[in-house]
Image (spheres, rainbow, N blue to C red):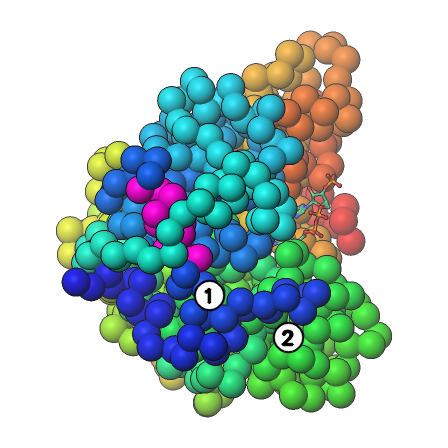
């Protein structure tokens, strides 16, 4: 019996081959990780988790978290990782929507989350930051180390990842075994991963980038990772000489460039730097090349599609471009105004659409939203605007969706506006992204007070703190008499962006 993703990830690597090493030197090899995944799968079965059931987790980055992902896949269940920044209110929405059988949370968050688990009828377990204690760790210690892996095919679900929407309501993207297995194999080949590679892994593992792009690609190739529990720029600088590949969001690279000690000799044995999740500016590309003599490889993807395009590993990497479609992936540029898909010729700017084995199955229990975004011919409408140049390189030039990307995290303005508009004393608001040296874009709110209500910047931020993850809280709030609107009554966010463009400069 085959389990497509699990068998793709564990594909005959020697048991003793290293897979993951923490900063303190402790490590796990492929054999040990297999055993841990069996313990997880057994513990899940003991709790009644069956094939297709969701297993939600809001936990810190640890070996146990990786084993949970692998064991969930092995048990035929569906992994649902949640950003550790999400508040209890946000978590409640996800648990209500996905109805997981089990939810594992951080030990210190138990008091906050137990009521949420109870109202959503979800069994709750806990895990400490290092993954070695808590009720879940105790269960694992009592679980057998062998498990008969459940069969799963390409079309079966492996994970649900939530992505906020332009309506302000988060949608669960259903990711299949086929999506992840095909993407991992393509990336390992394209980026020339081998058993000798050591990936510097500093990304969080509750989103596509750190979980799938990083871990799956490493495992498919039988390579290994230096596993940092978070992005600490000094630690990254220290670890670089022990690694051969790094993956990061643009903020990681701009923070490294801010350190003088980050230079060509520090990265002498690195063979590849990869960036994605947000646009990398030409200035950062240029500064990086000047400092290290290397060209960052930029690639493009989405939660719904995994990776879509990438610059070549061998071949010319073009700064400002995200390269060519991956193996088996098709892209087309269409007229965003047309009712039917009207494909545009090279060099024209339009909507980027994508089709291939990487494209998700749809939004969890939202057939209308799925139908609105996946066309009948299988192309997914990304909401990103771009053009393909005459050499076939894709360039992203903007977004048709109202989205802010801050430090690699997506923030949908609508969600923040809905929360601000509910506050006493607020008449209306507009949330925009403004250029920011560290985060690329910074979430910024423009608020119109109701009458002579007394309301200041900090009262808005404080009110939002219990509702929204910290990275979504506006870095600045400005008050104005009225929002600029066009003749149709639509708020002119471009006018606001222009007015406030230099505030973080
Ligand atoms: C933290 N803060 C942020 C962000 N992160 N504010 C805005 N944007 C952010 N991204 C705030 C916190 O709220 C806090 O505010 C203060 O910064 C310090 O928090 P801390 O956790 O210490 O920050 P940090 O460790 O410096 O984190 C910044 C970071 C992190 C390292 C850039 O955000 C990060 O690792 N980002 C990577 C995101 C990622 O993996 N994206 C991939 C998504 P206060 O002090 O006021 O409380 S997958 C994807 O996009 C697709 C599929 C793709 O193509 O990859
Ligand atoms: P998410 O929904 O969190 O997966 O974010 C996906 C979005 O990130 C895409 O639709 C793009 O707008 C953006 N994105 C990802 N990689 C890049 C990149 N290399 N350049 C520009 N935007 C990117």
The majority secondary structure of the magenta stretch comes to helix
Residue shown at the point (76%, 49%) measured from the top left: 504
Front residue of 488/310: it is 310
Q: Is residue 172 magenta?
A: no
Q: Quadrant of residue 363?
A: top left
Left-right relation of 202 to 397: right
Q: From the viewer's perspective, is residue 489 above or below residue 389?
A: above
Which type of secondary structure does the marked residue at label 1 adopt?
Answer: helix
Question: Residue 4: x percent and y percent?
Answer: 24, 63
Question: Residue 449: x percent and y percent?
Answer: 68, 17
Q: From the viewer's perspective, is residue 383 above or below residue 99?
A: below
Q: Is residue 37 magenta?
A: yes
Residue annotated with mark 1: 32
Q: Quadrant of residue 492?
A: top right
Residue annotated with mark 2: 285
Q: Quadrant of the N terminus?
A: bottom left
Of discs 1 and 2, which sits in the foreground? 1
Residue shown at the point (63%, 66%) measured from the top left: 26
What is the magenta range? Answer: 36-45
Q: Say if residue 84 shows up in the picture.
A: no
């Amino acid at each position: 019996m085959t389990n497509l993703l699990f068998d793709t990830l564990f594909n005959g690597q020697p048991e003793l081959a290293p897979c993951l090493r923490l900063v303190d030197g402790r490590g796990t090899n492929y054999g040990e990780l297999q055993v841990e995944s069996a313990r997880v799968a057994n513990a899940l079965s003991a709790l009644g988790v069956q094939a297709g059931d969701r297993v939600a987790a809001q936990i810190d980055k640890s070996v146990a978290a990786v084993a949970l992902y692998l064991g969930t896949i092995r048990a035929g269940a569906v992994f649902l990782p949640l950003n550790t920044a999400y508040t209890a209110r946000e978590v409640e929405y996800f648990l209500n929507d996905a109805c997981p059988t089990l939810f594992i949370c951080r030990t210190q968050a138990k008091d906050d989350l137990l009521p949420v688990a109870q109202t959503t009828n979800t069994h709750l377990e806990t895990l400490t930051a290092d993954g070695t204690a808590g009720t879940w760790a105790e269960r694992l210690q009592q679980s057998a180390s062998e498990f008969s892996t459940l069969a799963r095919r390409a079309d079966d679900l492996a994970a649900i990842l939530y992505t906020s929407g332009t309506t302000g309501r988060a949608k669960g993207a259903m990711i299949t075994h086929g999506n992840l297995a095909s993407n991992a194999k393509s990336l390992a080949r394209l980026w020339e991963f081998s058993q000798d590679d050591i990936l510097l892994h500093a990304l969080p593992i509750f989103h596509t980038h750190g979980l799938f792009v990083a871990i799956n690609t490493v495992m498919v190739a039988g390579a290994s990772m230096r596993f940092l529990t978070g992005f600490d720029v000094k630690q990254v600088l220290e670890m670089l000489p022990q690694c051969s590949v790094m993956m990061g969001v643009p903020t990681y690279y701009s923070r490294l460039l801010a350190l003088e000690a980050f230079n060509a000799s520090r990265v002498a044995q690195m063979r590849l730097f990869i960036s994605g999740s947000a646009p990398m500016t030409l200035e950062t590309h240029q500064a990086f090349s000047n400092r290290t003599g290397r060209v960052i490889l930029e690639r493009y993807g989405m939660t719904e599609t995994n990776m879509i395009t990438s610059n070549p590993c061998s071949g010319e990497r073009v700064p400002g471009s995200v390269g060519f479609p991956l193996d088996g992936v098709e892209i087309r540029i269409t007229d965003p105004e047309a009712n039917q898909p009207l494909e545009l010729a090279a060099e024209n700017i339009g909507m980027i659409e994508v089709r291939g084995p990487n494209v998700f199955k749809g939004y969890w229990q939202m057939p209308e939203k799925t139908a609105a975004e996946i066309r009948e011919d299988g192309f997914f409408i990304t909401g990103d605007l771009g053009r393909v140049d005459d050499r076939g390189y894709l360039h992203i030039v903007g977004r048709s969706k109202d989205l802010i990307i801050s430090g690699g995290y997506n923030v949908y303005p609508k969600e923040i506006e809905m929360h601000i508009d509910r506050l006493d004393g607020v008449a209306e608001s507009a949330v925009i992204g403004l250029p920011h040296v560290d985060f690329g874009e910074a979430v910024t709110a423009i608020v119109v007070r109701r009458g002579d209500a007394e309301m200041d910047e900090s009262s808005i931020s404080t009110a939002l703190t219990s509702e929204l993850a910290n990275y979504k809280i506006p870095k600045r709030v400005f008050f104005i008499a009225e929002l600029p609107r066009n003749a149709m009554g639509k708020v002119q966010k471009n006018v606001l962006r222009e007015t406030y463009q230099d505030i973080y400069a």
